[in-house]
Image (cartoon, helix red, strand yellow):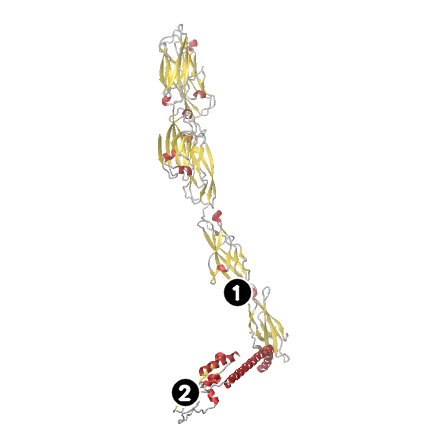
Amino acid sequence: KVVIYRLWSHLIYSMCQIRYSVPEEMKEGSLIGNVAQDLGLDLRRLRSGRARIVSGETSQYTELKADKGILVVKERIDREELCGDVMPCSLSFEIILENPIELHRVTVEILDINDHAPTFKSNVIKLEISESATVGSHFDLESAYDPDSGIHSLQNYVLSPDNNFVLKQLSNADGVRFAVMILQKPLDRELNPHLSLKLIAVDGGTPRRSGTVNIEITVLDANDNPPVFNQSLYKATVAENAPIGTYITTVNASDADSGSNGLVSYTFSNVKGKSAEKFEIDSSSGKITVVDNIDFEKDKKYEIRVIAKDQGGLSDATKVVVEVLDINDNAPLISIMSFSSIISEDVSPGTTIAVFNVKDADSERNGHITCSIDSNLPFKIQSSLTDYYNLLSDVAFDRETKPEYNITITATDSGSPPLSTQTNLHLKISDVNDNAPLFTKPKYSAYVVENNVPGGSIFTVIKATDADWNQNARVSYILEDSSVNGVPVSSYVSVSADSGVIHAVRSFDYEQIKDFHFRVKAQDGGSPPLSSNVTVKIMIRDQNDNPPQVLYPVQTGGSLVAEMVPRSADVGYLVTKVVAVDVDSGQNAWLSYKLQKATDRALFEVGLQNGEIRTIRQVTDKDAVKQRLTVIVEDNGQPSRSATVVVNVAVADSFPEVLSEFTDLTHDKEYNDNLTFYLVLALAVVSFLFITCLVVIISVKIYRWRQSRILYHSNLPVIPYYPPRYSDTLGTGTLPHVYNYEVCRTTDSRKSDCKFGRAGSQNVLIMDPSSTGTMQRIQSEKSILDESDSPLCHMLSLPSCLTSQQKRTTLTGLINDFSFF
């Protein structure tokens, strides 16, 4: 039989209540129910959620087979031992799953089986009955006890057949059955001084179980008044944990008989459960006291049947009800069902941190529990199911502010004085990348001396910190893209990704760049990464790496500049001023002027700071006209650098005097400097031209001689030749065209020119009109040879036979040859 109740909560994903009914005394491993099927869970969920049973009981009678999803019996269940007379008898526990948290309550009702037979406290009931006992007299018999419940409990008494007695069965208000033997026929001690009967107690189980006790009756002499209790019911209270010997109450029964027949003794009849072990009664006085520890949590009430019997065997019975008063003797018990010891700092408020169970064995006010934690902690406690509580986050966490918490849960009952129990939970907050790296300064600046070595460290103080932890706090440094004077900043500096050390990529020159800015980004190793940046300013420090430069007087190679000083100049006369600059800065650019050499040191001085050259005495006629001063200009660097300048000073009153002196000086100087060079160069050029011309002339002569020899030794006839460009004039001759050439030659072949003039003189060949024979030449052989189109010219290949185009080509070649020479 399975009963399922489903509950919902915003704190726990799902909660169900299942109820099973199983008989007691089942074998170990017997199936109770299919939890997975009844809860609608698959086996993978049970395994992944680490399903387990949690219970505050010291003994667990059931076991969850998570791999099969079934609930089985773990150890033997005895309903009578577990619940006693409490009906119904059940076990309650919870099944908890994690990821997400699910809590399911399971109740297993233990059904009674007929596993106990009714038993009597003693094996023999001895009765002494006076023969004078009247018919109808009642004789209370010891009750049997059957720990089973319901139909399996004691149901009936049977008395062995007897003529003197019949059995009457009665029940108390609590349902306990007891037997009374009634005398139906007077006894006769003389006939039967001793009677033996059997009382059988039978339960209602199948098969029935029974218990038997022998009744031994001794017939006494007449005692006709039985004892009578003055109360049919006695009520008393006792506090739990009452010390041994604590007085409970006193029962009292009176007997109208006298003598020994009037003496009454008190005994407990069958004491339900373990009452006989907790109390004792004084047989003479009827005083009931405590003899064992009384625990309210085990038994809240005791019912005791007291028998008062006189010496004649007559008896009466009464019931004593002892109620146990609860005292606050049990502190609450805290059981942690589920606890996440590590939680991310970005969880939202209201997240379940732990689920715990709190129980208090006390009752009513003493069992009312209040759970609390330190008010300074960002947590709260909220009740979910009965006796179950959830520990929830109350605010957002920040691991950087508080990385862990020690949580003390205090459970306090409402007793007087109150009892409490504490349990400690250690919660760690895992890191989330929620903090960007932060630089220690808003901006950084550093100095570097120019002419530094590339690759050297410039700046080592740059540092960024990240409040996160582990990988999220691992900072890398990145140089952001930018430019300095149009050049990427990465060509100036580099940044170490791990340490943030800035290195110079190149050697800096203060005169080109004095400072520059760039940005460095610090990025952590989180996902996604966070970053911040900072501006770094690098300032170049000047180094004395440039000597002074003299601007005036200007030093030229070919001309000479001189300053004139009249012979009438007074002391302090300003001759000139040396002007120099230094591209360095600061003290490296502070210049000082000194007179290094001079023709007459007693005549001039140089201002240390301003470079002014002044006379220090009166100029006389004996002073030389030509004065040469060498001034050195030094900067103030360490080490210092210097430059020198030569100042020529003419001491004269007129310009011609100065010109003659310095012209000679200049001419001599130039002559001495260039004489050797020009002589060598002229000799080489002349020698080359002479040899070349000689070779060309000899070659031409040889060539012409060889051509003339070939012509004179040949037997070829001379055939007149009329060039096509000749035309007949008046039928007697031709008009040749003569061209004039104007050649302009220069040493630069690019400037040579050749100009063709108009046709000039004409050679007229006059023919005899009456002649029909050979044409008569009026020109000499040289004239014929001069005709460029004559066959002879072509045969001899003479230069005079060249055409105009050939002449131009030959002329251009000659010009180029002369240009080369």
| Tag 2: amino acid | Tyr
Residue nearest the observer in this picture, 502 or 411 = 502
Of the pair 361 and 545, the residue shown nearer to us: 545
Q: Which mark is residue 511?
A: 1
Query: In the image, 677: left or right of 475?
Result: right
Out of 379 and 565, give the one closest to the viewer: 379
153 lies above or below 666:
above
State the residue in front, 463 or 716.
716
Q: Which residue is mark 2?
A: 726
* 428 w.r.t. 269: above or below: below
Mark 2 or mark 1, whichever is nearer to me: 2
On the image, the x and y values in percent for residue 337 come to 43, 35
Q: Amino acid at mark 1?
A: Glu
Q: Which mark is residue 559?
A: none
Q: Is residue 383 visible?
A: no
In the image, residue 73 lies at what x, y percent?
41, 29
Say whether disc 2 or disc 1 marks the residue closer to the N-terminus: 1
Crowding at mark 2 (Cα within 10 Å: few <14, some 14-19, many 20+)? few
Residue 59 position in % (x across, y down): 44, 29
Residue at position x 41%, y 15% in the image: 213
Q: Quadrant of residue 309?
A: top left
Secondary structure beneath label 1: loop
Alpha carbon separation for disc pair 2 and 1? 82 Å
Res 751 seen here: yes
